[in-house]
Structure formats: structure tokens, C-alpha cells
Amino acid sequence: MTTALVTGISGQDGSYLAEQLLSQGVRVVGVHRRLSAENFWRIEHVLDRVDLRYADLHDLGSLYDLVEEYRPDEIYNLAAQSFVPTSWSQPILTAEATGLGPIRLLEAVRRVHPKARVYQASSSEMFGNSLDGDGSLNERSRFAPASPYACAKLYAHHMVANYRKAYGLFVVSGILFNHESPRRGLEFVTRKVANGVAKVHLGLTESLTLGALSPRRDWGFAGDYTRAMQAMLRASSPQDYVVATGVDHSVEDLVRIAFAVVDRDWRDHVEHSESLMRKNEVVRLRGDASRARDELGWTPEVDFSGLVRRMVEAELERLG
Ligand code: NDP
Ligand code: GDR
């Protein structure tokens, strides 16, 4: 029986990945950190089928013990401080968790179980504002990280490539562009907008306050992207892959399409706050996932408007 260890099991991606692995008969060891109140709302429906174990990305010993005990075939390192604005207010914590955390895991793997295949959650944020003109970003594009989060991810990304080369480990990074779902954290813009639209529609509030409306992102569905993670670990050789839809939209497009789901005009309900504007905003990200398509056979199934509709409907159901 294949055993997979998943860090960040309580997060958005961890929940979809756990479902997919369980449906394939894989034994899932879910790693979560100790909190004063458990945060299992995304994985409640699979809790009875997952081996839940405590470990923290800050604590090498806890990671080492788990790798030694389970000797997993696959390790998915999804845990991170993943919110860009928090990386400005807590840059050192972000460097520790998002940058050094993966190295602690790699050290445990190389010392006790080098046969494990490891997936590292890299990010399109590592490209920063390096995109020229109307192009798109692939595995050979230039990195120009524009936040402490992106710098931490890029450090881990390069370390994965170094461990692969120096130690011959099967370790890969997926350079994933934004992916969303009804299980997204409320602080991220897609879920914030979906939630705001539902509240306006149900008469719970009049408006929604946002920062910049012009940034463009390549938004896909999280469940499509966790399929790509698995395909990377099961490929014949270890390589990094960009995972993206290839289509970008602005925050304004997002808001317009989301309010249209409930037949409303976004201009009647959206307010602006300077406090939500970002330092070093990343203006536009669009990915080119040709390598993942050609070598892994991966393509996304959910398009942008289908994703937005799904998220707004989920919020209406939750709040209604
Ligand atoms: P989430 O923020 O939803 O989940 C992050 C997870 O990491 C949570 O389970 C959280 O636990 C856990 N975590 C945070 N700090 C620690 C720590 N010190 N020790 C152990 N666990 C910790 O992220 P997503 O699911 O959206 O993303 C998964 C990964 O992919 C992240 O690394 C993210 O940076 C990266 N990524 C995400 C993209 C996206 O668009 N979603 C795109 C590209 C990369 P808790 O529940 O206790 O907070
Ligand atoms: P991002 O996602 O920073 O791209 O990182 P987020 O949804 O936070 O921001 C996307 C864009 O929306 C603009 N924006 C706002 N964002 C938030 N959160 N709240 C607002 O009110 C708001 N108004 C406008 C932002 O300025 C930005 O341009 C996500 C995370 O999942 C990372 O972990 C991951 O690595 C990248 O995607 C790829």
C-alpha cells in the first residue's frame, strides 16, 4: 500500500489532495501543527480515514520522527505561511516556515528515507513582475520575487533543485499559479469576493471593500491543481512544472463576474480602501503549462467563470 505524508492537510490544497489520495487507496498521513482550537473544517469528511499526526515546519525533530516512523513513498509539502500581506508584517516567521521549513523536511528525507518522493509547493509569486508584454511564464522564465513570501518560496525552490542534483533525490517543485475553491481562506480575494457577493445578495451587508482592482492573475480550481501535484510525483523522472490555466483576469473581472451570478452590478457594491493596497504589487501573472500538458497529460477542467459561479453558490448555501 502506498503511503503519502501531507503537510498542510488542514489547508485548502491539503483537503483536495487528501480526498484524491484516499480515493486511490493510498494511506494518508496528515501533518498538522498544534493549535489551541483545531482547524479541521476542510477535512472533517475524511478525518476518519486519515492518520493525523502533529509536526511543525519550525521543528526539525518532529518532521524527522514522522519520516522515520512512516517511511512514506510520497511526501507533499503544502504547509506554509501562504498569505502575501502577512509576509510583510511577519517576514521572519515567513522565512522560517515558508523558506526554511521545506529544508528541514528535505534534511529529514535525505538522512532517514532518501527513497521518498517529495513535492514542494512553489509559487508563481516567485516571478514577481518579470512578465514582459503579453507573454506568459514558464519553467525557464526569470524569477523576480516581490515580497518576503516570494523570496522565501524562491529559496526553497532553489534548494529543492540543489538537493535533487547533489543527492540524487526525487524532489520536485510545482510552480503553481493561483488556485481557488469554496475552501479558500477568507482573506484571499476570490473567497472574500464570493463571500461579499453572497452577503450583499442576502441583505447582510451593503458593500464589499477591496484594494487594487487592476492586478491580473491566472486563477484556476484547486482540485485540478492537486491532480497535477500527484502526476509530478509519479512521473518517470523528477522535474519542476508550471501549473496554470493560461488565461488571466483582473480583480475587476472577478468582481464583475461574481456580482453577475446574483444579477447585480458590482459598481453599486464595491468600495475601495487604501489600506488594502500592497507594497510591490505583482501586476500580472499568466502561466504557460505546456510542459505539464505534454509530459504529464495534465489539463485544467474548471474555467474561470465556472470557478467564480461555484464559489458564489457555495457562499450562498453556507450563509443561507
Ligand atoms: P493554506 O494557507 O490554505 O494552507 C496552509 C497550510 O499550512 C495549513 O494547513 C496550515 O495549518 C499549515 N501551516 C502553516 N504554518 C505551519 C507550520 N509552521 N507547521 C505546520 N503547518 C503549518 O494554503 P493552500 O492550501 O492554498 O496552499 C498550499 C501550499 O501551496 C502553500 O505552501 C502555498 O504557499 C502554496 N501555493 C498556493 C497557491 C494557491 O493559489 N493556493 C499557489 C501557489 C503556491 P493551519 O490550518 O494550522 O493554519
Ligand atoms: P495572491 O492572492 O497574493 O496572488 O497569492 P490574493 O487572493 O491574496 O490576491 C490576489 C490579488 O488581489 C488583489 N486584491 C486583494 N487581495 C486580497 N487578499 N484582499 C483584498 O481585499 C484585495 N483587493 C485586491 C491583491 O492585491 C492581489 O493582486 C495567492 C496565495 O495563495 C499565495 O500563497 C500563492 O503563492 C499565490 O496566490 C500564487
Image (tube, grey):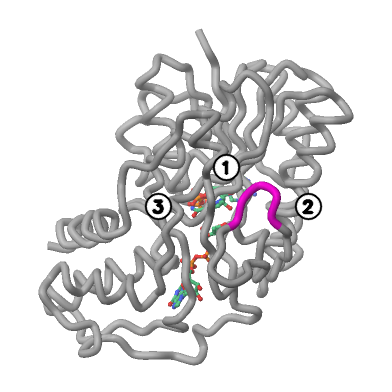
Question: How many badges with numbers are in the image?
Answer: 3
Looking at the rendered structure, the kind of residue marked 1 is Leu
Q: Position of residue 203 (x, y in %)?
A: 12, 79
Is the magenta region chiefly helix, strand or loop? loop
Q: Residue at x 44, y 90 (%)?
A: 273
- Which disc number belongs to residue 290? none
Q: Quick one: which residue is furthest to the right in this view?
A: 166
Left or right relative to 299: residue 95? right
Residue 20 percent location from the top left of the image: 39, 28
Give the foreground label among 2 and 1. 2
Identified by mark 2, the residue type is: Tyr
Q: Earlier in the sequence, mark 3 or mark 2?
A: 2
The Cα–Cα distance between marks 3 and 1, rounded to whole angstroms, is 17 Å
Look at the image and tell me whether residue 163 can be seen.
Answer: yes
Q: Position of residue 309 (x, y in %)?
A: 21, 59
Q: Residues within 10 Å of mark 1 (few under 14, many from 20)?
A: many
Q: Is residue 128 left or right of residue 254?
A: right
Residue pointed to by mark 3? 220
Question: Circle 1 sits in a helix, a strand or a loop, which is it?
Answer: loop
Q: Residues within 10 Å of mark 3 (few under 14, many from 20)?
A: many
Relative to residue 47, is residue 288 depicted above or below? below
Q: Which residue is mark 2?
A: 155
Q: Which residues are magenta?
A: 137-141
